[in-house]
Amino acid sequence: MQGTYTEETGKALFRATAELTRQIGWSAFDAGHHGAAQRHFIQALRLARAAGDIHVGAYVLTTMSLAAFLRGHPSEAVDMAEGAYERAKNLPGGTKVLSFAKLAQARAHARAGEANEATAALVLSENLLDQARPDTHPAWMNYYTRERLATDATEIYRDLGRSRDALAWSRQADAMPADRYTRAVGIRLAVEASVHLQNDDLDQGLAVADRSVRLLSQVRSARAHGYVHDLTTLLAPRQRDKRVAAFVEHTRRSLPATS
């Protein structure tokens, strides 16, 4: 902040700091510190504006959309994701950013039970991701792959009650390496387990849930652990089953309680 540099260098510094601040905000959110996360997201938006980088700003706004969705505010999340898309849609080189915004919008619509809107947003997200060229998107979007989209699509179709589609998307996401994306894979498996349980397939549900617990016990994430604790709530009516009681007890020992 005290340095002397050219305008171009200054914009590059603000751009990098905006993305770092967004990451800090998401880490805070992941740990359950929502107030701190919101402050960092707002600061990241200011830094992106100072950098004059609409792509970074749109990505920050999409991250805020995901946070709103996960906190139970799908309508607010839809507005943020749509705003991110509209801000960046006419700029070159931002296809992945646009795809991610539409994916976030699809998640929020699905949670609100808006099937047509969710499906349309997901299809557009897929199409945009297919159009993305490696030499045009920002390096900080490298993690966003077809498998990453499939992970979220699993939850989208779970929320829409379309179990067959949810399980098909989960199979597409299997290529994501668990040793590199431990948290994302663990969350996806928890979602898949909930689909099996909703289908009254207790054996498969518990088997997949156990894989999720094994992975998520390796990470410190209130958000991720919350997905598994949601499974224990879903299993509550079956706790007389010894397998269910054993899983619930194993989960309580392996994962800290959510805040």
Image: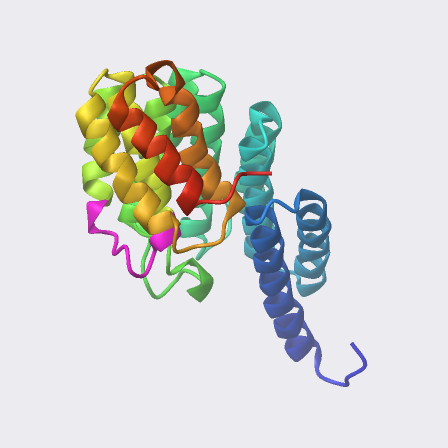
Residue at 55% across / 38% down in the picture? 258
**Residue 64 % position (x, y):** 60, 42
Up/down of 226 relative to 146, above or below = above
Is residue 202 toward the left or the right of residue 48 in the image?
left
Identify which residue is drawn at 46% across, 41% down.
Answer: 225
Q: State the image coordinates of residue 181 (x, y, percent, origin top left).
A: 34, 56
Q: Residue at point 24% right, 44% down? A: 173
On screen, residue 188 above or below 115 = below
- Quadrant of image for the N terminus: bottom right
Q: Is residue 142 left or right of residue 1?
A: left
Can you tell which quarter of the image residue 100 is in? top left
Give the quarter of the figure containing the C terminus: top right
> Magenta segment, which residues?
174-183
Helix, strand or loop for the magenta stretch, by majority: loop
Q: Is residue 11 above or below residue 183?
A: below
Q: Is residue 100 above or below residue 7?
A: above
Foreground residue among 42 and 72: 72
Query: 48 or 161, which lies in front?
Result: 161
Q: Is residue 79 visible?
A: yes
Q: Nearer the viewer, residue 53 or 253?
A: 253
For this orientation, the residue located farthest to the right is 2
Q: Residue at x 55, y 48 (%)?
A: 30
Q: Position of residue 18 (x, y in %)?
A: 63, 62
Residue 204's quadrant in the figure?
top left
Question: Is 179 within the magenta?
Answer: yes
Report whether residue 123 is seen.
no
